[in-house]
Amino acid sequence: MPARPDGAGDYDVPVLTDGTVVLRRLDERDVPQLARNCADPAAAEFTTVPLGYTESDARWYVEHFVPEAWRAGREYNWAAADAATDRLYGTVGFNALRGTTADVGLNFGPHARGTGAAEAACRLLLEHGFEHLGLTYAYWVAKVPNWASRKLAWKLGFRSPVRIDGFMEQRGASVDAWILTLGADDPRAPRTPWDGPPPPGAPR
Ligand SMILES: CC(C)(COP(=O)(O)OP(=O)(O)OC[C@H]1O[C@@H](n2cnc3c(N)ncnc32)[C@H](O)[C@@H]1OP(=O)(O)O)[C@@H](O)C(=O)NCCC(=O)NCCS
């Protein structure tokens, strides 16, 4: 096969699936949905995506950022898609790989939120990280007050939330973050009753 001009061809991405969600390599077909997901207000508010995100940004991410970070062993990012239709839900991966630890990063589109897809994708990711990459700990870093993210981390068994003011860099600013921890041998289920706010719109 001829080399791809973008140089994105030469890295291997394991395919992970539970039959409902599939984690696979990000590619050209994902660009329009990825751009929509990253232009969503929640992504702008709580992640480090550039503001005013376009398909050109998404193409650069797919063709350059992800392959280069993967090859360098810095970050492993997957497309999380519907296993039946292959429609992109979002992205999920290990960021800041260092020693035997990494941070979980994810961004799901509005169409995917509340469906259980993000939880399923994280379970596949964590299983892979602990069983096949030799990770001993995974960390969850969420900008305060990203309760949707924190609740997902709680469902997955992430524990010991701490708040560190100014810990997270977001477009040149230092913003406050919650950091949670999951060990390789920890149960991947909540440790304690949920102590955050009820879902928006729920009776208090
Ligand atoms: C974080 C994210 C992946 C979570 O996906 P999800 O689990 O499908 O999200 P949901 O909308 O179902 O929210 C998760 C839970 O938090 C709850 N929640 C959401 N916003 C909340 C708020 N402001 N206050 C209290 N609870 C909230 C939801 O009701 C839901 O609870 P439930 O499962 O008991 O019904 C998704 O919201 C996302 O991609 N957001 C944009 C990018 C982002 O924040 N990425 C994470 C960076 S750390």
Image: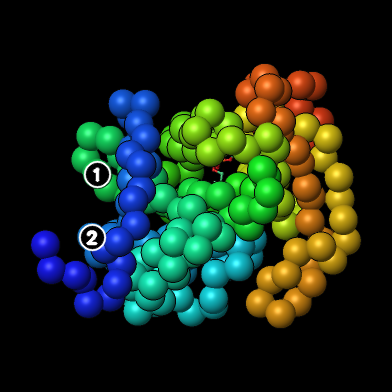
As drawn, the label of residue 86 is: 1
Relative to 9, say whether 113 is above or below.
above
Q: In the rendered structure, are the residues bearing label 2 and label 1 in contact, judged by CB atoms less than 8 Å apart? A: yes
The reply to whether residue 146 is in sight is: no
- Judging from the image, what secondary structure is the residue with disc 1 in? loop
Q: Which residue is drawn at 62% across and 38% down?
A: 135
Q: Residue 45 occupies which quadrant of the picture? A: bottom right
- Image coordinates for residue 125, horizontal then vertical, percent: 50, 38
Nearer-the-camera pick, 149 or 26? 26
Q: How many labels does the image show?
A: 2
Work out whether residue 32 or residue 138 is closer to the camera in this orientation and state it: 138
Which of 180/186 is in front?
186
Residue type marked 2? Arg
Q: Say few, some or many: other residues with alpha carbon within 10 Å of mark 2 (under 14 / 14 to 19 / 20 or more).
A: few
Helix, strand or loop at label 2? It is helix
Q: Which amino acid does label 1 sit on?
A: Asp
Name the N-terminal-most of marks 2 and 1.
2
Horizontal arrangement in the rendering, residue 6 relative to residue 142 (left or right): left
Quadrant containing the C terminus is top right
x and y percentages locating residue 47 in the rendered image? 61, 62
Q: What residue do we see at 49% from left, 53% from top?
A: 76
Instruction: Give the residue number, with chain letter if any, for mark 2.
Output: 29
